[in-house]
Image: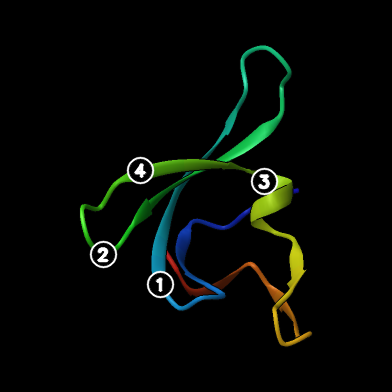
């Protein structure tokens, strides 16, 4: 699965920039490297499958965990 670099919005509202898709050195799992666009601008990683999944919110809506809002 390919993931476009860009600005994504988390389903809770905050913005993040996807920097890269990396590969775990031991298990070869794809990991998304992304940066908060607020607060301390920290950098995080999350499994690609989790980053791109659809989740069910507390009010039973099905939404994308992260939604692309601007490709870079």
Neighbour class for label 1 at 10 Å: few (<14), some, many (≥20)?
few
Which residue is located at x 71 percent, y 29 percent?
29
Nearest to the eye among marks 3 and 2: give it.
2
CA–CA distance between discs 4 and 2?
Answer: 11 Å
> Reading the chain from its start, which is encountered first: label 4 or label 1?
1
- Name which quarter of the figure residue 65 lies in: bottom right
> Reading the chain from its start, which is encountered first: label 1 or label 2?
1
Nearest to the eye among marks 1 and 3: give it.
1
Which residue is located at x 69 percent, y 59 percent?
52
CA–CA distance between discs 1 and 3?
Answer: 18 Å
Neighbour class for label 3 at 10 Å: few (<14), some, many (≥20)?
some
Which residue is located at x 68 percent, y 72 percent?
64
Label 1 sits on residue: 14
Please indicate whether residue 71 sits to the left or right of residue 1 in the image. left
Neighbour class for label 2 at 10 Å: few (<14), some, many (≥20)?
few
Label 3 sits on residue: 48
């Amino acid at each position: 699965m390919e993931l476009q670099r860009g600005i994504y919005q988390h389903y809770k509202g905050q913005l993040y920039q996807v920097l890269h898709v990396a590969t775990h050195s031991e298990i070869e799992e794809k990991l998304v490297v992304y940066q908060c666009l607020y607060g301390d601008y920290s950098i995080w990683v999350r499994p690609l499958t989790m980053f791109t999944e659809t989740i069910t919110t507390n009010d039973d809506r099905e939404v994308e965990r992260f939604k692309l809002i601007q490709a870079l």
